[in-house]
Amino acid sequence: MVRLEGILYKIRESLNYVKPSEAAVAEYILKHPETAVTMTVNQLADACYASASAVMRYCQTLGYKGFKDFKLKLSGDLAVINLHDLEQETLSPDDPIDKMMAVITNTNIQSLYSSLQLVQKDQFTAAYHLLIQAEKIDFYGVGSSFLIAYDAIQKFMRINKACTAYSDFHMQKVSAVNLNENDVAVAISYSGETQQIINCVKIAQSKGAKVIAVTKYANSPLSEMADAVLFVAAQEDEFRSAAMSSRIASLNVIDMLYTACAYEDYDRSLTHLNQTYDIIHQSQREANNRAENNNRRTKP
């Protein structure tokens, strides 16, 4: 199985919150990752005009034991990226269509692999246990994130979980205010700063509901408020606008949550899935029969 640590993504996102001395280290590594893995800590410090202690602090900020641990994980990521041709490429208007297809596909693949490493096992376990125990689940999303929320309810309803996803912000608030301590709100926002979502989360928490966040890897208002945080990775350019690879990665997180919940009580879930399958196909057969009968009546 292909494994990515997601280091390059973590480095890019860290530029939003690290100190200037550490940001210099991050920028150098992003520009010269292949060179950085061959350097000593002092060589890297000299190359980015920082101190060795700043390099060490930066590695620890990202969650690694030290520079050696960081280099080992970065080297592994680069090997996977090179092997599977997952490096981030940019597009220009005169690029051939086959390059466009390859770049979009590889970018989405990289987002999925990176997200797999960003999702922490303890946070994921906590999240799906909350969903299993919930009497009702509210899914909140705005814009493209609402499409993810709507996809979620179509899945969870099939295993008999009571859930809602409203596109109207006022209805989201109405639903949130009716939650209680037995319910869960799932807030989907790549930026983690969408004010409508933050407002709904505050209302849900005021009623005692637990909150699961699906958001980017960063210390955002949403990630700080949530009881369980599932990070997703994305590579977006000016045309993608955080709505393509982040959407793919978020949908994948929903699929993982749904599957974990369904397999927790496999027999019960399978019973509900079969029932929903039967009723949908029965309705379709009845509709086809009515259409066929109408056609017979209208024939001369």
Image (cartoon, rainbow, N blue to C red):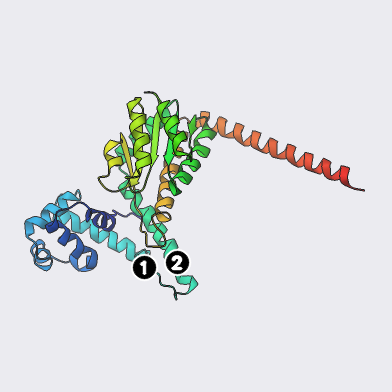
Outermost residue, bottom direction?
Answer: 94
User: Which of marks 2 and 1 precedes in the sequence?
Assistant: 1
**The disc labelled 1 sits on which kind of residue?**
Glu
Residue 102 tag number: 2
Q: Residue at x 44, y 37 (%)?
A: 139
Furthest toward the top, the residue is 181
Q: Residues within 10 Å of mark 2 (few under 14, many from 20)?
A: some
Which residue is at the front of the view, 30 or 81? 30
- How many angstroms separate mark 1 from mark 2 (CA)? 9 Å
Give yes or no for contact between labels 1 and 2 (Cβ–Cβ under 8 Å): yes
* Circle 2 SS class: helix
Element marked by disc 1: loop
At 40% from the left edge and 70% from the top edge, which residue is drawn? 91
Number of marks present in the image shown: 2
Q: Amino acid at mark 2?
A: Ala
Q: Going by the image, does 202 lie left or right of 295? A: left
Q: How many C-alpha atoms fall within 10 Å of the one at disc 1: few (<14), some, or many (≥20)?
A: few
Residue 164's x, y, as percent? 48, 34
Residue 172 as seen in the image, left or right of residue 50:
right
Q: Choose between 36 and 2: the one closer to the eye.
A: 36
| 260 relative to 64, above or below | above
Residue 37 appears in the rendering = no
Instruction: Please tell me whether residue 113 is drawn above or below residue 172 in the rendered image.
Output: below
Q: Residue 48: percent from the left, percent from the top?
A: 13, 66
Question: In which quadrant of the rendered view does residue 25 lie?
Answer: bottom left
Residue pictured at 39% horizontal, 36% vertical: 186
Q: Position of residue 159 (x, y in %)?
A: 52, 32
Q: Which residue is mark 1?
A: 89
